[in-house]
Image (cartoon, rainbow, N blue to C red):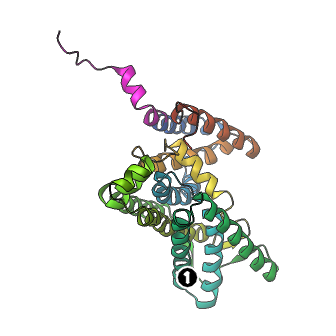
Amino acid sequence: MPENNSFNFKKWVSHHITSVAAYGGLVVCLIVFSVVPPFFGESLWSAEKFSALMANVIVTALLSVGAVFVYSLGHMDISIGAQVRVYALLMVLLGNATGSLLPGILVSLAIALLVAVINGSAGQLLKIFPIIPSLVFMMVFQGISGIVYTNLNTRSIFLKTIDYRIFKEPWLMIVALVIETLVVSYLFYYTKIGKNSRAIGANEVSAEQNGVDLLKYKVLPYVILSVCVVLASVFQMGYTGAASDATGTGFEMNVMVALILGGMPLAGGMKSRISCAIIGSFTYSLLAVGLPIMGVPNNATFIIKAILFIVVVLITCRKKYGTLPR
């Protein structure tokens, strides 16, 4: 009997349902927010709104691209929002004291690398859930920033002598995101760091039996994320030229939602992709910027995002024994 080589569209969609949902969601958002807002007197693609869109995209995307490494392990870092808050604070304080952002960036990078090593190794060495160390750091960083702002008797501080207007330029945001994406993509797809991270996420026992150093390749993904967190902190602080006690609030959830909207499997493994971070970040930011233009109240936008999040989870993350992989 001759072999049937005809294209089975239904089977292809079933096999690529994650990508179909992620790219389809982005396309729908682009169409809706390009067509509808002009009826409300504003265009999403005006210079002002495009700048706001890029400002919304850049931090989430920079964080999400780095987080793909950690999520590919099947892990999650919930301290990144609190880290951004402290690093932005350091950059402003040291920037005002020295007249340069470099000292604050270097100090933040040193702290971030230390946190990354502890976050990545504690779970393996202490035999605890990997999310626990990041939960501890989240509370520590929140406490530190709270003490500083209390002692300064203010809720926000501003750069005084440094011109930060360059960080508002959409072209710089795009260049930074492209460079980070290219570097991280190379590490993720063409080096042992990415390959072993995905192998651990797919089956940790099998990866170890095949000679993968679990401790080493659980730490390195966090190290890569730490560099991305510092870079995101620079743009978060630079866009407003300030740091406040609310800086970074909810960023860890924004990253998780963006990755899910982009089709990232929370269990990690071989289906993890850098494109999930880019697609998800733009979809999430289009919702954040586009819905208010259409007159949707802020509280309602959270509800809409939550509904879309649940729908995407149900479509892309269903497993035989439950909805979420882990």
54 left or right, relative to 184:
right
Q: Residues within 10 Å of mark 1 (few under 14, many from 20)?
A: some
Quick one: 129 or 143, which is closer to the camera? 129
Residue drawn at x 53%, y 76% as measured from the top left: 114
Residue 166 visible in this rendered orientation of the protein: no
Quadrant of the rendering where the C terminus is positioned: top right
Residue 217 visible in this rendered orientation of the protein: yes
Q: Amino acid at mark 1?
A: Val
| Residue 176 percent across, percent down from the top left | 44, 64
| Residue 149 percent across, percent down from the top left | 77, 77
Q: Is residue 83 above or below residue 62?
A: below
Residue extending furthest left?
2
Quadrant of the rendering where the N terminus is positioned: top left
Look at the image and give the residue range highlighted in magenta. Answer: 1-21
Residue drawn at x 28%, y 20% as measured from the top left: 7
| Residue 269 percent across, percent down from the top left | 43, 47
| Residue 33 percent across, percent down from the top left | 57, 39
Tell me the element at label 1. Answer: helix
169 left or right, relative to 254:
left
Quick one: 208 or 46, which is closer to the camera? 208
In the rendered structure, does residue 10 fall within the stretch colored magenta?
Answer: yes
In the rendered structure, does residue 165 fall within the stretch colored magenta?
Answer: no
| Residue 23 position by quadrant | top left
Q: Which residue is mark 1?
A: 107
